[in-house]
Amino acid sequence: MKAAVCTAYGPPEVVTIMEIPKPVTGKGDILIKVAASAVNSGDVRVRGLAVTGLMRVMMWLVLGFSKPRKPVLGVVYSGQVEETGPEVTEFKPGDEVFGLSGFRFGGHAEYISVPAKSIIVKKPVNASFQEAAAIAFGGQTAHFFLHQAGISKRVKPEVLIMGATGAVGSAAVQIAKYYHASVTAVCSSAGKELALRLGADKVILYDKEDFTKTPGRFDVVFDTVDKAPKKICAHLVKPGGVYTTVGGMNYAKESREQLEFVKRLFEEGKYQAAIDKVYTLEQIMEAHRYVDAGRKKANVVLVISN
Ligand SMILES: NC(=O)c1ccc[n+]([C@@H]2O[C@H](COP(=O)([O-])OP(=O)(O)OC[C@H]3O[C@@H](n4cnc5c(N)ncnc54)[C@H](OP(=O)(O)O)[C@@H]3O)[C@@H](O)[C@H]2O)c1
């Protein structure tokens, strides 16, 4: 099968299209013909080993020393079930699914094999494969952090989303709106239209205005881009409110329930797939370059088959 293989840690050029063996389907596994995936901040961070200090040591240990042990990157996929192992009862060939492969990666290839018990669910009925691939990563992450901040228990909360146009931020705006929040989005002038389209009530353009000087106070301040540490945001949090960030050592745990939640919102028309650019598998290097720049608006999709 054709796959985008990360041959070393380094610039986008280390990712090459190669023919590699199709994955073997174990007894409890599902083989999926991948229709679409996404190139996320996580993929380019792993490829470039773009971290320092203790985090770099941890990444070496988890991912491999000289190159990624799992050389086919891609933590999300959507596609059709081609084959199931004998112990699989929940899915059958032909099912249209989407999911997250986490540290197994493998989404940037024509086929992926995942355990049936992993983070995989049937694709939203009204989503294209590209849309399904786009909503998984940001939706899951934003759901995790906002729920940790108690979003579902707060009544009409005031929420500030710092970095409202990234994969995580664009999802966070929409999930916060689902919980009847009044959302203040912090983004650049280039992202204003997207933030408003996703439902933000107010936009602070960080290239024109210092958001830390806003007179507002918030129940939840969510830094989705790791650019606004607690020490500069603490005064923006109301008593009883919460500051949360994607930075630091708090990692979003993935779960099937979270993916089901994102799927339900999409099916109810309360969540958009916000796609910035679409690349083919053959254009993987270009996709990595674009995501590396850190300026993508919401999601970059990789089309793998029709
Ligand atoms: N802890 C976890 O479990 C976890 C999970 C997932 C992701 N993450 C981390 O979360 C971060 C965001 O991930 P992502 O996938 O959402 O990233 P992304 O989509 O690549 O973020 C790009 C977006 O960030 C915006 N941005 C850049 N600098 C900004 C600034 N100073 N203020 C406001 N917006 C800014 C850019 O808009 P402009 O170009 O218009 O400024 C662009 O739209 C990454 O650091 C990632 O490693 C952590």
Image: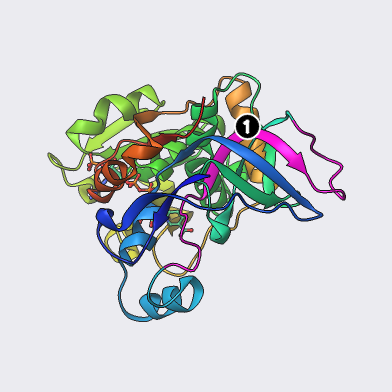
Left or right: where does residue 231 sit relative to residue 182?
Answer: left
Magenta stretch encompasses residue 274? no
**Closer to the camera in the image, 62 or 179:** 62
Q: In which quarter of the image is residue 158?
A: top left
Q: Quadrant of residue 56?
A: bottom left
Residue at image point 24% right, 37% down: 204
Q: Does the beta carbon at disc 1 come under 8 Å from ligand 1?
A: no
> Where in the figure is residue 14, as x and y percent of width and height?
30, 58
Question: What is the total number of numbered labels drawn onto the structure image?
Answer: 1
**Closer to the camera in the image, 212 or 68:** 68
Left or right: where does residue 192 sit relative to residue 41?
Answer: left
Taking 63 as reference, is 152 above or below it?
Answer: above
Magenta stretch encompasses residue 72? yes
Q: What stretch is highlighted in magenta?
A: 68-93
Say whether residue 257 is visible: no
**Closer to the camera in the image, 241 or 26:** 26
Q: Main secondary structure of the magenta part?
A: loop
> Where in the figure is residue 5, as x and y percent of width and height?
41, 55
- Label 1 Cα neighbours within 10 Å, binned few <14 / some 14-19 / many ≥20: many
Amino acid at pointer 1: Lys
> Where in the figure is residue 26, as x and y percent of width and height?
76, 56
**Closer to the camera in the image, 208 or 194:** 194
> Where in the figure is residue 273, as x and y percent of width and height?
47, 28
- Residue receiving disc 1: 263
Taking 75 as reference, is 82 above or below it?
Answer: above
Taking 235 as reference, is 303 above or below it?
Answer: above
Say whether residue 99 is visible: yes
Left or right: where does residue 98 sit relative to residue 295?
Answer: right
Residue at image point 62% right, 22% down: 267
| Secondary structure found at label 1 | helix
